[in-house]
Structures are given as C-alpha cells and as structure tokens.
Amino acid sequence: MAARQAGLSVFDAVFMAAVVYSGASQFALVGLISSGAPALVAGVSALLLSLRHVFYGPVLAPSLRRVGGWRKAVVAFGLTDEVFAVALGRLRQRPATFSWMVGLEAGAYVPWLSGIAAGAIAGDALVRQVPLIAPALSFALPALFVALLATLLPLDSGSRASGIRLASIGAVAVAGAVAGVLYFAGLENWGVLAAGVAGPVAGICLKKWRANEQ
Amino acid sequence: MSNDSPLFFVLIGLGVYLTRLVPLLLALRRGAGDGETDETPGAMDGWLGFVGPSVIAALLVTAVLPQPGQALWPDLARTGVALLPTVAVAVGFKNLGLTVLVGIFSYGLASAVI
C-alpha cells in the first residue's frame, strides 16, 4: 500500500520485496523513492539498515554446521529478523537440518510476498472505491516507520537497567533532530545518512556516560 | 540509474544478501561452531545497534514534515494528532499491520477535522 502511494507499480512493489527481502530496507527505499532521493542515497540507507544482519549468521553458525555446500547460500537468503528469532529459540535444543531451515524460511517468505501483493492490489481497489481515503493513505509510510521503531527500540526493563534504553532513545532523538534540521535546510536527501552517523555517535556517548554513572 | 528500476532493486537485494551470507560463511569457516555461543555479539549493543533505529527515525521525520510550499502548522497538527494513537498502538501491540491501519484511520479523521 505504501509502495503504491510512492508511485511504484504492483509489479515493482512485489519484485522489490522478492529480491531485497528485508522489511526495514524496503520501507526505507519506498520512503526515499517517494521523496525523490538519488539512487546512491537510497541504496546506502537501505544497506545501512541491513547491517544488523551481519550478526545473524555467526550467532546461528553453531547450529548450522550440518548444512553444507550450496545449501548455506540458500539458507543465508532467508535469514530475516523473524527467522533468526525463531531459529535461535529452536536451535538451542538441536542442530538445524537444511530442510527445517528452508521450511522455516519459506513459511516467512511466501506470506511476506503474498501480503505485499495483496496490500498493493487492495490499496488500489480501496482508493477506487473510496477516493476520499487517498489522502489518509499517505500516512501509511509514517505509520510503518513508527511500527518499525517500536520493534527496534529496546523498551524492556532489562534494557532500562543497562542504560541501552536511554542510549537508544537519545540516538533516535538526535537522529530525528539532525534529519529535521537538514530537511528545513533543503538537504533532506542527506538527512538520513547524516542521522545514520549522528544517532549512533549520540547513543554510544550516552551509553558510556550511563556506564560511568553506574 | 533510476532509484525505482528493477536493476537497482537487484543490486540492493544483492547487498542485503551479502550482509547475511558473508558473515555466516566466515563464521562456519573459522569454526565458530565450536563455541556454542548463543549470545548476540557485544558489538550489537554498540554502533550497529543504534544504526537501525536512527535511520528509521530520520525517515519518519522526513516523511511527516510538510513539503516546501505546504502550510506548515495545519499539516503538523494533523500529523501530530494522528501520531498519538499510532505510537500508542505500535508500542502496545508491536503489530505492523494494526499500526498502519490505525495510522491511516487516525490521519483520515484528523484531516477531516483540522
């Protein structure tokens, strides 16, 4: 739905989901495409968001030793946030087989693509039936970003005690402020990249300050 | 290259895929399997752990700010009113679809009033 609002066709939306296959990166691409950002900025931002994936393989590696050869390349494609979370819980008990991992990953991939296609088609139909809803649909993308932030921010009590929660909220606040200032300065295309550096720097400083306090 | 061409999406997809594949292959090659660690590496709490939320926050800010030439305050007021229930549902339920639906509905209502 958000992709259609950004001007992508149903095919483009599904194709992007099929090859990029990373919710946060896809949503970032949709947002940056709709704002007319250059390809370089959109690409770097999407890849920055996928950097968290570098930890999934090494963490799961102890349980994936029975998966050999080309099968590793297949398994790696589906190592999303959801698959990682489910696999981590299950693989603590027993090593993974190739068929188990592929089954788990297909169970995430197929519904993901189906959902994207259904959203793109249903969004179109909805706007045709109820034209008044079109302006409200423009809020789909901001709402997606809010939902993603809620899942990415460590808001639990354990994170609060360790200072990670404060550092993360500080990082988000600084990133948002940097993006806002650059937006009003007419540099909105660079705001996301600048925030991707300034936010983490603020987060690390806050984390160290909190550690020294304790 | 256009930022909405299929080739562009393929290149980004390749980059995302490599962030999953290369660390897995390196970990398996150096025998990380012997470690039986089930803890996320400490670096996750460091710089990289803050990158995702920071980039999303920046995208959110640029998505809700009015385009140049648009009236600033009415647009900000509509957005602010719509954000309140959206954030509440996002934090309370952590459900992507529900949050988007509430966001669209709230913004529609706010637009009708403001």
Image (tube, coloured by chain):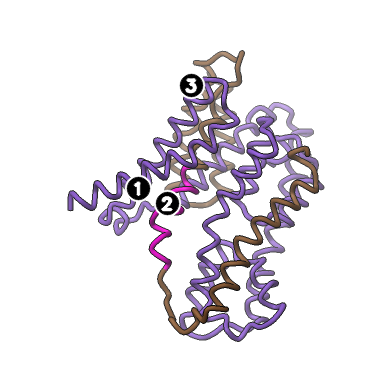
Chain colours: A purple, B brown
Instruction: Tell me the chain of label 1.
Output: A
> Is B102 situated above or below A95?
above
Q: Is residue B51 left or right of residue B21?
A: left
- Which class describes the residues within 10 Å of circle 2: few (<14), some (14-19), or many (20+)? some
Q: Secondary structure at mark 1?
A: helix
At 69% from the left edge and 42% from the top edge, which residue is drawn? A1
| Mark 1 neighbour class, 10 Å CA radius: few under 14, some 14 to 19, many 20 or more | many
- Name the kind of residue labelled 2 in the image: Trp
Asked where in the image residue A173 lies, by quadrant, the reply is: top left
Q: Give the label on residue A204, or none.
A: 1
Examine the structure image and report whether residue B85 is included in the region drawn in magenta. Answer: no
Residue located beneath label 3 in the image: B77
The answer for how far apart the CA atoms under marks 2 and 1 are is 7 Å
Whole-percent x, y for residue B16 in the image: 64, 56
Marks 3 and 2 close (CB-CB < 8 Å): no
In the foreground, A190 or B95:
A190
Stretch of the chain drawn in magenta: B40-54
What residue appears at the point 47 percent right and 48 percent down from the top-left corner? Answer: B51
Residue B75 rendering spot, x and y as whole percentages: 54, 20
